[in-house]
Image (spheres, grey):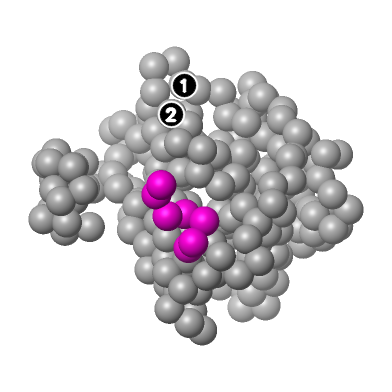
Amino acid sequence: MPAPLRSHLGDTHDHTSAARYSANSGSAIGASRPEALVHALAEAMERGAYSLLLATVFLGPGGRVARVLRPESLPDDLARWHDLAQRKVRGPVHLLEMTTDLGDPRSARTPCPARASRCRARSIAVGPPGTGRALSELVQCAAVADHDGQEAITPDLRALRAYPVLLAAGRADFGPHLAAARPVDFHDTAAPATPVATCAGSRPP
């Protein structure tokens, strides 16, 4: 967001020095303006939640314990997607709970085993759609990877080799943190039926 707009909203902090670590941009399209707006806002919220997850798990004092959704707590339709995802990547799929302290909609991310490191998915939405979208995107990514057989295009992180913690965060290497992760149950949340209802429900009082 441009500095003048942020200033108008009360954010006058100079974020220049932190820009290189930011993943909070959001852009999207939709069949209507409300749908595109909701999609773009969800993208920005997803990236914000993901940035906070990386910062707190990898960079925070002592490291915050990640939260992982218990597969047995998933409703039947999501459990089927979870099972399909594990079969597609031929390994375990962990759903990381990324809801922030601001109470934004539940979000979930699916880190893959090393064999499918090119396939990662994250999504944010109210209720099952967010988790379902993360799982379906992972299945899609795994299918594409199996089809084209090409090596993944990964970010160039050579500049971080001297900083192991930043390198691990850049790679989103949650593997070492999963053993200590705190299991949490999936809880369904009511979602607005339409993008217009979502926009109306998000207006400040």
Q: Residue 56 carries which label?
A: 2
Q: What is the secondary structure assignment of the residue under circle 2?
A: helix
Mark 1 or mark 2, earlier in chain = 2
Local crowd at mark 2 within 10 Å, few (<14), some, or many (≥20)?
Answer: some
Is 12 included in the stretch rendered in magenta?
no
Whole-percent x and y of residue 62? 44, 15
| Residue name at image x 63 percent, y 61 percent | 192
CA distance separating discs 1 and 2:
6 Å
**Could you say where residue 134 lies in the image, as x and y percent from the top left?**
64, 57
- Specify the amino acid type for callout 2: Thr
Residue at 69% across / 47% down in the picture?
189
- Write down the quadrant of residue 51 in the picture: top left
Q: Say if 195 sits above or below 41 in the image.
A: below
Q: Name the residue under label 1.
A: 63
Residue at the spot x=77%, y=62% of the render?
A: 88
Rendering coords of residue 106 (x, y %): 59, 45
Q: Which residue lies furthest to the top in this view?
A: 62
Q: Nearer the viewer, residue 4 or 139?
A: 4
Q: Which amino acid does label 1 sit on?
A: Gly
Q: Give the range drawn in magenta.
A: 199-205
Q: In which quarter of the image is the N terminus?
A: bottom left
> Is 6 left, or right, of 73 in this rendering?
left
Q: Is the C-beta separation of discs 1 and 2 under 8 Å?
A: yes
